[in-house]
Amino acid sequence: MTTLKPLLAKNRSWALQRRQRNPHYFRQNVHSQTPHSLWIGCSDSRVPAEVLTGAHPGELFVHRNIANMVVNGDDNFMSVLQYALEYLKVSRIVLCGHYGCGGVQAAISLPDIPLGDENSPLARRITQLRAAIAPGLAETSEDDDETERLNALVEVNVLAQFRHLVAAEPVRAVWRAGAALDVFGCVYDLRSGHLKELIQQNAEDKMP
């Protein structure tokens, strides 16, 4: 029978190590949070925001979904964005995709996969993703190296989602108010563990 014991044991070990290094490690975040950044990433288990950035609890406000998509009609995403900007006053948004993204791979393969015949939340989201990377699909060929093509389209997706992000009303409102807000589009390399910056914007009048 599968149990939670291994995770609980690792949790206790981690918490003990943190308290041994700093007795006040957990107390400092009990009553409030003041994250400096909103991280919008992919739900992929290989791309944990806090781990790959070396962040501690309280530093990152995180939203993750399949293929790090920015969908204005998604109340879940938009509520996270609004809360991060209006209430937590983050000064940085990092939109992060990753090479080898399964969501982008599925979008490339539509409609020739079983998902293409479904009417499900996942199928609808992957269909939206395919529309976002359509310009990149038109510029690449199935004859290209498969890995290189996928990675190129991962970058296309980050740039497409970045455009959606900087056009979102909560972001625009912050910039119109003259508040400091930097928005970054990045890609994470699974092979090296490194982040690569693709694009950055810090004011409303600098649309990419």
Image (tube, grey):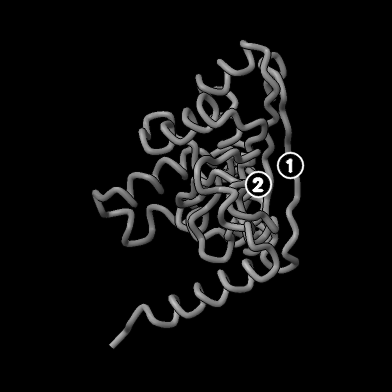
Q: Residue at x 70, y 60 (%)?
A: 189
Q: Earlier in the sequence, mark 2 or mark 1?
A: 2
- Label 2, secondary structure: give it: helix
Does residue 201 lie above or below 103 as drawn? Answer: above
Report the number of discs.
2
For label 1, the SS is: strand
| Kind of residue at disc 2 | Glu
Circles 2, 1 touching at the beta carbon (< 8 Å): yes
Name the quadrant of the N terminus.
Answer: bottom left
Q: Which mark is residue 1?
A: none
**Where does residue 76 sit, x and y in percent of width and height?**
38, 38
Q: CA distance from mark 2 to mark 1?
A: 8 Å
Nearer the observer: mark 2 or 1; the answer is 1
Where residue 46 appears, x then y in whole percent? 57, 66
User: Could you say which is closer to the camera, residue 112 or residue 78?
Assistant: 78
Q: In this rendering, would 2 be left or right of 101?
A: left
Residue type marked 1? Leu
Residue 190's place in the image compared with 89, above or below, is below
Q: Residue at x 59, y 53 (%)?
A: 57
Residue at image mark 1: 198
Q: Position of residue 156 (x, y in %)?
A: 63, 43
Mark 1 Cα-neighbour bin, 10 Å: few <14, some 14–19, many ≥20: some
- Residue 34 versus residue 72 in the image, above or below: below
Residue, x 47% and y 80% (percent of image)? 9
9 or 150: nearer the viewer: 9
Pointer 2 residue: 155
